[in-house]
Image (tube, helix red, strand yellow):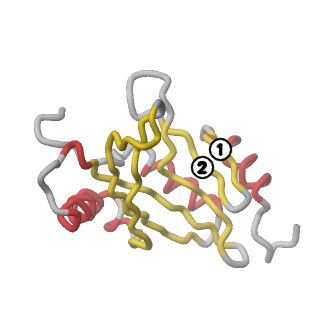
Amino acid sequence: MSSSQPPSIQELKRTLVAAGLEIYRTRPDAVHLAERPRDNQILDAGISVRPAGEREIEVRVVMRAQRSDFPRDPIDTLYQRVREHAEGDLLARGFTEIETREQRMLDPGDKTKTLDTWYELVFSRTFADLESAIADVKRVLPVEKFVKGPGQP
């Protein structure tokens, strides 16, 4: 690999593992990092790392609000709650909003039933090198990726 080429996905994955990060899954365009947001073995994957440009690395973070936590809120208000939640931890660090997504959580026993709907925002930041990206990933990894509803600790 010449110094002007971005790392391959496999090289990126190896470097992330060597840096002590746990991999959730690898896709052709990105490596999704594993998070343990709860006190058990359930994994989540709200952060991904991908090549961007010649040597640059893009870090994406997904944050959400759940309909079940705010059943009366209009959709725009749910997205605004996520934006406000992201202000100190992501936006202040140079991340920018690049996408909104509405994800239906289907009942595994009956795909015609929706258990909940997540209103997600995707934030992105590009780094000049992999080392800087990894350092920032380690800073945002412990950040809560969802807006807590009323009464949640």
Q: Amino acid at mark 1?
A: Arg
Q: Residue at x 37, y 63 (%)?
A: 121
Residue at numbered disc 1: 25
User: Image check: 118 left or right of 110?
Assistant: left
State the SS at label 2: strand
Q: Residue at x 61, y 72 (%)?
A: 128
The image shows residue 41, relative to residue 53, as above or below, that is above
Residue situated in front as seen by the camera: 112 or 68? 112
Residue 93, position in %: x, y? 38, 65
Residue at numbered disc 2: 32
The image shows residue 57, relative to residue 13, as above or below, that is below
Q: Residue at x 73, y 78 (%)?
A: 54
User: Image check: 152 left or right of 95?
Assistant: left
User: Image check: 44 left or right of 63?
Assistant: right
Q: Amino acid at mark 2?
A: His
Total residue callouts = 2
Residue 85, position in %: x, y? 25, 57
